[in-house]
Image: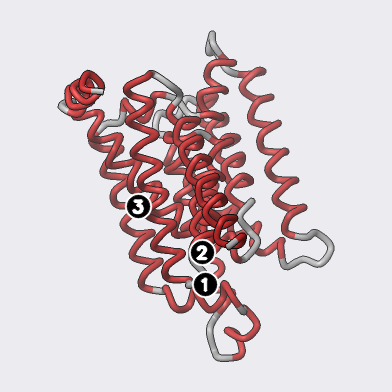
Amino acid sequence: MGNSIETLLYYLSFPFVRYALIVGVLIALSSSLLGVNLVLKRYSYIGDGLSHVAFGTVSVATILGISSEMIVVMPVTIVTAVLLLRTSKNRKIHGDAAIGMISVGSLAIGYLLLNVFSNSANITGDVCSTLFGSTSILTLTITDVWICVVMSFVVLVIYFLFYHKIFAITFDEDFAKATGVKADAYNTLLSIVTAIIIVLAMNLVGSLLISALVIFPAISAMGIFKNFKMVVLASGIISVICGVVGLLVSILYSTPVGSTIVVANIVVFAITRLITFRKERN
């Protein structure tokens, strides 16, 4: 135990480790807050769909040799999020079907393009890193950190500034419209900030595991608390703790960053389920 602490303190003396922790905390916090609303709106799977769109866009950016992928990935993912919201209101194509179509389609097209046009000698490794996360979170530059800080700050400000409006459209969108709330506008806003978080989270946990950051903390918090504010607060705390623990364990034992963070969330979820089960029995 003592050796682990000494090793951890040694690693924390490096700026790139501190950068990873800052980014990890911000992404975990932002995704968990949005996750509560997405889960309650039964739209949590949007994270998975948007992450696959981001993967497809990254593939195109890689083939075209675009060095700063986020310049392309961010706007494309945001536009897709808005289109998904519009499509979900189409009676012919329901929201879950639209997400499934875009999700699978983007993933397939991205992988196909990489295989056909990429000059990389390690396509399989590149794809696995993008899908499941990689050590790129530990190679962030100060510019990457500042981009994440600014974008996360924007997401958090939007969330708390429009907290009551987002609360209203989460629980009863029709009633919110009847009281004068511009539900469509706030739904669009929610989709945009979700897309931003998805893009930021790709370096942390990878495309296939992003939904875990959105779903697990929210579900865990809902198992303990019934009050919306307490659920939001607990979700944020759980997500940050799991993110930090996952990152530190990954650094100490050289495990995959994304998978380790997700496993930490699964453990917390199992504990909260056990607590809930015991309360119900008593």
Marks 3 & 1, CB-CB < 8 Å contact: no
| Residue displayed at 55% across by 61% down | 279
Residue at position x 33%, y 24% from top? 251
Q: Secondary structure at mark 1?
A: helix
Check contact, mark 2 vs mark 3: CB within 8 A. no
Residue at which label 1 appears: 186
Q: How many marks?
A: 3
In the picture, the disc for residue 190 is 2
Name, please, the residue furthest toward the bottom: 179
Q: Quadrant of residue 104?
A: top right
Name the amino acid type tagged 2. Answer: Leu
Give how far across and how far down residue 276 sits, in percent.
56, 57
| Mark 3 and mark 1: Cα distance apart in space | 18 Å
> What residue is rendered at 57% in x and 60% in y?
38
Q: Which residue is mark 3?
A: 151
Residue 229: x %, y % from top left = 42, 71
Say what amino acid the circle numbered 1 marks: Tyr
- 212 vs 237: above or below: above
In the rendered image, the residue lying farthest to the top is 121
Q: Within 10 Å of the Cα at label 1, are there few (<14), some (14-19), or many (20+) other Cα atoms?
A: some
N-terminal of the two: label 2 or label 3?
3
Locate residue 207 relative to residue 193 in the image: left or right: right
Task: Choose top left, top right, bottom left or bottom right for residue 175.
Answer: bottom right
Q: Could you tell whether 7 is left or right of 144 in the image?
A: left
